[in-house]
Image (cartoon, rainbow, N blue to C red):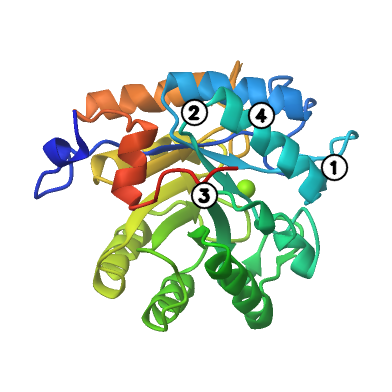
């Protein structure tokens, strides 16, 4: 079925773009042995999640000892494997702050993934400052524009929506903005229903063309999934954000978390978007030749 046939004035019946955050910077085998660390584990885990219904893979890479890195060579190998094994899957590379300092965080952008994460302001993380200076935000966004990469704008705080709107008005993004509300990171914005609704209202007011999704951390993941699907948005899951099915059960795989989110979509009379539908909804071009 085409995306057009799915579209509805309320948007609530639109297919849901499922983003799977497969690895992140912090989750390790000691948290859950299913967390993929090596590139081959990442490719296998992503492929399974893709077959389960994910249409975006949010990617980080690790050193052999499990520590985070932004090594462009590792990203290149991951990218080649995912293009080969997951045709059409939207690849989103993280420029997050745990895997490098300053401009190192954007060192893989010349690989021209479909998307890259872009945080437009600073906030606290559990044990440190998540530092995104205005200079660094400008540089990362310029690189993404130059290389024709669509940013996913990470919203850790209300001010980040205002910054995104300012950047959008200044023509700093290619294509319509795609924002992600992140809730439940310790020392940043907790999961809070009233704030979530205000984020939505503010995004619709300041960024009327934006598509949006949400990520909840740990036990907040499933709550955020429910809220986003019910409100007609898109949703993120995966072992980066949460390693459990519930309090007592570890998630057996990224795919299991994707399947749980697909079930939530079905309960709300929505389908998981195919990669082609996701590209149409995001107005992303077909993948450039790698
Ligand atoms: Mg990440």
- Relative height, residue 253 to residue 122 (above, below): above
Q: Give the percent coordinates (x, y) of residue 122.
A: 62, 72
Say whether residue 190 is left or right of residue 65. Answer: left
Instruction: Using a 10 Å C-alpha cutoff, classify the residue at mark 4 as few (fewer than 14 neighbours), some (14 to 19) or many (20 or more).
Output: some
Q: Quadrant of the C terminus?
A: top right
Instruction: Name the residue carrying label 1.
Output: 67
Looking at the rendered structure, the secondary structure element under dot 2 is: loop
Instruction: Using a 10 Å C-alpha cutoff, classify the residue at mark 2 as few (fewer than 14 neighbours), some (14 to 19) or many (20 or more).
Output: few
Mark 4–mark 1 distance (CA, rounded to whole Å): 21 Å
Instruction: Name the residue carrying label 4.
Output: 81
Instruction: Name the residue carrying label 2.
Output: 87
Q: Nearer the N terminus, badge 2 or badge 4? A: 4
Q: Residue at x 30, y 39 (%)?
A: 229
- Residue placed farthest to the right in the image? 65
- Relative height, residue 79 to residue 93 (above, below): above
Q: Nearer the N terminus, badge 2 or badge 3? A: 2
Q: Give the percent coordinates (x, y) of residue 253.
A: 59, 19
Instruction: Name the residue carrying label 3.
Output: 114
Viewer-side residue, 200 vs 40: 40
Viewer-side residue, 228 vs 90: 90
Label 4 lies in ligand 1 vicinity (Cβ under 8 Å): no
Q: Nearer the N terminus, badge 1 or badge 2? A: 1
Mark 2–mark 4 distance (CA, rounded to whole Å): 10 Å
Q: Give the percent coordinates (x, y) of residue 171.
A: 41, 79
Mark 1–mark 2 distance (CA, rounded to whole Å): 29 Å
Assess whether mark 3 and mark 2 are in contact (beta carbons under 8 angstroms).
Answer: no
Mark 2–mark 3 distance (CA, rounded to whole Å): 13 Å
């Amino acid at each position: 079925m085409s995306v057009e046939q799915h579209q509805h004035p309320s948007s609530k019946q639109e297919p849901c773009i499922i983003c799977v955050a497969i690895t992140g910077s912090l989750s390790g085998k000691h948290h859950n042995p299913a967390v993929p660390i090596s590139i081959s584990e990442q490719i296998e885990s992503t492929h399974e999640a893709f077959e389960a219904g994910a249409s975006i893979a949010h990617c980080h890479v690790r050193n052999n000892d499990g520590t985070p890195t932004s090594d462009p060579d590792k990203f290149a190998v991951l990218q080649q494997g995912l293009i080969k094994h997951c045709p059409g899957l939207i690849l989103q590379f993280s420029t997050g702050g745990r895997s490098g300092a300053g401009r190192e965080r954007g060192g893989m952008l010349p690989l021209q993934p479909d998307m890259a994460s872009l945080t437009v302001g600073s906030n606290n993380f559990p044990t440190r400052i998540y530092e995104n200076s205005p200079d660094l935000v400008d540089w990362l966004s310029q690189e993404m524009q130059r290389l024709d990469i669509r940013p996913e704008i990470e919203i850790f705080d209300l001010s980040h929506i205002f910054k995104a709107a300012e950047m959008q008005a200044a023509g700093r993004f290619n294509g319509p903005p795609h924002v992600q509300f992140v809730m439940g990171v310790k020392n940043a914005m907790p999961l809070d229903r009233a704030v979530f609704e205000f984020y939505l209202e503010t995004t619709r007011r300041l960024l009327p063309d934006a598509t949006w999704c949400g990520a909840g951390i740990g036990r907040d993941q499933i709550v955020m999934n429910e809220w986003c699907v019910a409100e007609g948005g898109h949703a993120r899951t995966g072992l980066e954000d949460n390693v459990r099915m519930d309090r007592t059960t570890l998630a057996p795989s990224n795919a299991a978390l994707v399947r749980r989110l697909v079930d939530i979509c079905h309960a709300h009379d929505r389908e998981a978007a195919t990669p082609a539908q996701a590209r149409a909804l995001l107005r992303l071009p077909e993948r450039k030749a790698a």
